[in-house]
Image (cartoon, rainbow, N blue to C red):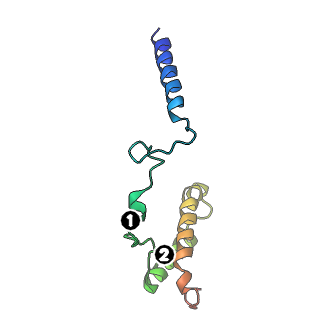
Amino acid sequence: MALSAARHGLLRVATARVGALAPRLGATPSAATATCWQRPAVGALASSARPYVSVVKYTREDVLEKLDAYHAEVLSTNWADYLNLVYNVPFWEAELEKLASIVQPYLHEPAVG
């Protein structure tokens, strides 16, 4: 009985919302009645300066240190230990992707490239 009452209430709300959400022809919503997806984002275009810089810069020494640590870890692992490889290879692949992006400015150097 409680389930049928809940289903009846849910159907009533759903049918009432469908009519409210349907677009009306020729009607333009005002700023007060516009829903959240119809209002323009005020903060998005307000400032032209970016407060957050998404570029991470590494010095040459940091890059060489990370490359050497990665090289030592991968080459010194026990390649006969299957479980070790299953656990560590996904992390090594993620680290390799990160290293590939941070090593780009130093690829022309013989010690790096």
The residue identified by callout 2 is 69
Picture coordinates of residue 90, whole percent (x, y): 57, 59
Quadrant, the C terminus: bottom right
Q: Measuring from the top left, give residue 85's x and y in whole percent.
A: 59, 59
Specify the farthest residue to the top.
1
Residue 64 is labelled as: none
Question: Which quadrant would residue 25 be assigned to in this image?
Answer: top right
Disc 1 marks a residue whose amino acid type is Ala
- Name the residue rendered at 44%, 79% in the picture: 57
Foreground residue, 52 or 60?
52
Residue at figure coordinates x 56%, y 70% from the top left: 96
Instruction: Provide the secondary structure element on which disc 1 rests.
Output: helix
The amino acid pointed to by label 2 is Ala
Give the mark nearest the N terminus, 1 or 2. Answer: 1
Asked if marks 1 and 2 touch (Cβ < 8 Å), the reply is no
Residue position for label 1: 46
Residue at x-position 57% and y-position 75%: 100
Badge 1 local density, few (<14 within 10 Å), some, or many (20+)?
Answer: few
Count every numbered label the image shows and give the total.
Answer: 2
- Name the one closer to the observer, 113 or 56: 56
Q: Secondary structure at mark 2?
A: helix
Q: Which residue is at 44% across, 71% downward?
A: 54
Residue 45 position (above or below residue 20)? below
Q: Is residue 23 above or below residue 46?
A: above
